[in-house]
Image (cartoon, rainbow, N blue to C red):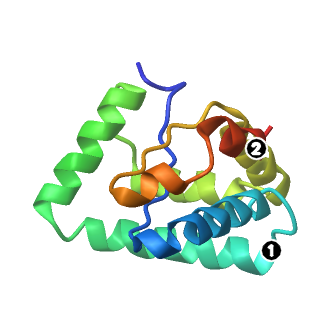
């Protein structure tokens, strides 16, 4: 089972000139995730997740992919209503704790192209989150 694993990612495409600034903004925004989260933002995120789940149910391929991911993680497909119930029960404190845990684990970082050589070091980026 992969129940104790997960993936959290951020993707950004930018020019060489804007790469360092883009990295700075990404780091700032990721750190903001662990503080000052409002109930309004949480509720908006829930609605977005619910809408995405509903839209994914319209595609056979997306449904199959979801079921496969659930079987790999939980050894069984999950009922959409139980997922919704779990999301509704999650509190601001739960989210802050989870995001703190995610951001305190070692980062996987990839930069491609000419901008990569001008970015700060991996160690410097990692220190921001410790």
**Foreground residue among 97 and 127:** 127
> x, y (%) of residue 44?
63, 79
Can you tell which quarter of the image residue 101 is in? top right
- Label 1, on which residue? 39
Label 1 crowd (10 A; few <14 / some 14-19 / many >=20): few
Residue at x 85% of width, y 52% of height: 93
Q: Mark 1: which secondary structure?
A: helix
> x, y (%) of residue 85?
59, 56
Residue at x 41% of width, y 55% of height: 80
Q: Which of marks 2 and 1 is in front?
A: 2
Q: How many marks?
A: 2
Choose the circle earlier in sequence order: 2 or 1.
Answer: 1
Mark 2–mark 1 distance (CA, rounded to whole Å): 24 Å
> x, y (%) of residue 28?
73, 64
> x, y (%) of residue 77?
32, 39
Residue 109 numbered mark, or none: none
- Label 2, on which residue? 129
**Foreground residue among 77 and 102:** 102
**Foreground residue among 29 and 90:** 29
Residue at x 51% of width, y 74% of height: 18
Can you tell which quarter of the image residue 70 is in? top left
Q: Look at the image and tell me in which quarter the C terminus lies.
A: top right
């Amino acid at each position: 089972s992969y129940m104790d694993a997960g993936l959290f990612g951020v993707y950004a495409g930018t020019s060489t000139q804007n790469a360092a600034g883009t990295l700075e903004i990404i780091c700032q925004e990721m750190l903001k995730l662990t503080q000052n989260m409002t109930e309004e933002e949480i509720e908006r995120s829930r609605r977005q997740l619910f809408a995405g789940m509903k839209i994914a149910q319209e595609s056979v391929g997306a449904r199959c992919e979801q079921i496969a991911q659930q079987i790999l993680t939980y050894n069984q497909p999950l009922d959409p209503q139980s997922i919704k119930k779990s999301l509704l029960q999650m509190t601001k404190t739960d989210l802050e704790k989870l995001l703190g845990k995610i951001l305190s684990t070692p980062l996987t970082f990839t930069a491609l192209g000419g901008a990569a050589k001008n970015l700060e070091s991996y160690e410097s980026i990692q220190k921001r989150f410790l």
